[in-house]
Image (tube, rainbow, N blue to C red):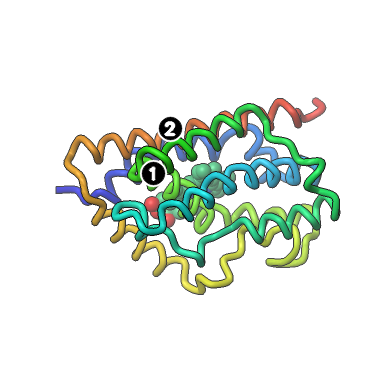
C-alpha cells in the first residue's frame, strides 16, 4: 500500500503547481515586483504563522499533532525580524491581514482547536514548503532586492537549526506515515491539505490584485 506521505504529496501535486504558477508568485520570481510586494507578502505570513505557532503551543502534548511540533521549525521570531527590517521599527502598527489571510489563519486555528490531524495537514503544507520551494523564493528575493544573503529580510526562509533539510524532510515523512487513523481519516487529512493550498492560492490571488503589473 502507498505510504501516507506519498499519498499526500501525490494528491496535492496539481495544487502545488497551481500556487507555484500563480500570477503573484510568477511575478515575484520573475523579478517584476517591488520590495513593497514582498513586504506585504511577509506581513501575510506573519498572520498565518501566528495561527500556526499558537496552535503548536496548544498541541505540543497532543498524541497526533504533538510529534510535529518542533521548535527548530518555528518562524515567528524570524518573521518579526524580517518585518522590522522591511517595514521599520513601528511595523506592528502598520500590518494588516487581507481577508483571504484572515480566512486562512482562522481555518488553521479551527483545526488546532478541534481537529489535530487537520492541523497536521496545515503544518505539512507550510513548513515542508518553506524548507523546499521557500529556498528558491529566498534566493530570488536576495538577488532582486539585494538583501544580505540569509540575513535581514529573508530570515523567515533560513532554518538555522535544520542544517540538513533533506534529512529533516525524510524524518517528517516518517512522522506522517505514523499518523494514526483509518483510510477515511487519511483521506480527510489529504482534503485538508488541498484546502490549505486553496487558501494559499486565495492569498496569492489577493496579493496579485493589490500588486498588478502596470502593463
Ligand atoms: C514559487 C513558489 C514555489 C516553488 C518554486 C516551489 C518549489 C518546490 C520544490 C522544488 C519542492 C521540492 C519537491 C521535492 O522535494 O520533490 C517543493 C516542495 C513542497 N512545496 Fe513548494 N514551491 C513553491 C511554493 C509553495 C507554496 C506556496 C506551498 C504551500 C503553501 C508549497 C508547498 C510545498 C510542500 C508542502 C512541499 C513538500 C512536498 C513533500 O516533499 O512532501 N510550495 N516546492
| In-image side of 98 versus 17 (left or right) | right
**Front-most of 40 and 137?**
40
**Front-most of 181 and 59?**
59
Q: Is residue 23 above or below residue 84?
A: above
| In-image side of 121 versus 24 (left or right) | left
Tell me if I can see residue 142 in this picture: no
User: Mark 2 or mark 1, which has the lower sequence index?
Assistant: 1
| In-image side of 6 versus 22 (left or right) | left
Instruction: Report which residue position mark 1 lands on.
Output: 121
Q: Which residue is at 46% across, 54% downward?
A: 128
Q: Quadrant of residue 98?
A: top right
How far across and how far down the image is residue 17, in percent?
Answer: 48, 38
Q: Which residue is at 76% across, 41% downward?
A: 95
So how many labels did they put on this image? 2
Q: Is residue 187 above or below residue 156?
A: above
Q: Quadrant of residue 114?
A: top left
Label 1 element class: helix
Question: Quarter holding the C terminus?
Answer: top right
The label shown at residue 195 is 2
Q: Quadrant of residue 25?
A: top right
Amino acid at each position: 500500500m502507498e505510504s501516507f506521505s506519498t499519498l499526500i504529496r501525490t494528491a496535492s501535486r496539481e495544487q502545488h503547481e497551481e500556487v507555484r504558477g500563480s500570477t503573484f508568485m510568477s511575478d515575484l520570481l520573475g523579478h517584476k515586483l517591488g520590495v513593497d510586494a514582498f513586504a506585504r507578502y511577509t506581513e501575510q505570513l506573519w498572520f498565518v504563522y501566528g495561527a500556526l505557532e499558537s496552535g503548536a503551543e496548544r498541541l505540543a502534548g497532543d498524541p497526533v499533532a504533538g510529534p510535529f511540533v518542533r521548535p527548530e521549525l518555528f518562524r515567528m521570531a524570524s518573521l518579526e525580524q524580517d518585518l522590522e527590517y522591511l517595514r521599520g521599527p513601528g511595523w506592528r502598527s502598520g500590518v494588516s491581514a487581507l481577508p483571504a489571510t484572515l480566512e486562512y489563519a482562522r481555518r488553521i486555528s479551527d483545526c488546532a482547536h478541534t481537529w489535530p490531524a487537520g492541523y497536521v495537514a496545515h503544518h505539512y503544507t507550510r513548513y515542508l514548503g518553506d524548507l523546499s520551494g521557500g529556498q528558491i523564493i529566498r534566493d530570488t528575493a536576495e538577488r532582486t532586492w539585494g538583501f544580505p544573503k540569509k540575513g535581514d529580510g529573508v530570515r523567515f526562509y533560513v532554518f538555522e537549526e535544520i542544517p540538513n533539510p533533506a534529512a529533516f524532510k525524510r524524518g517528517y515523512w516518517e512522522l506522517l506515515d505514523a499518523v494514526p487513523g483509518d483510510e477515511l481519516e487519511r483521506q480527510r487529512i489529504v482534503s485538508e491539505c488541498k484546502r490549505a493550498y486553496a487558501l494559499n492560492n486565495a492569498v496569492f490571488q489577493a496579493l496579485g490584485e493589490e500588486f498588478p503589473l502596470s502593463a
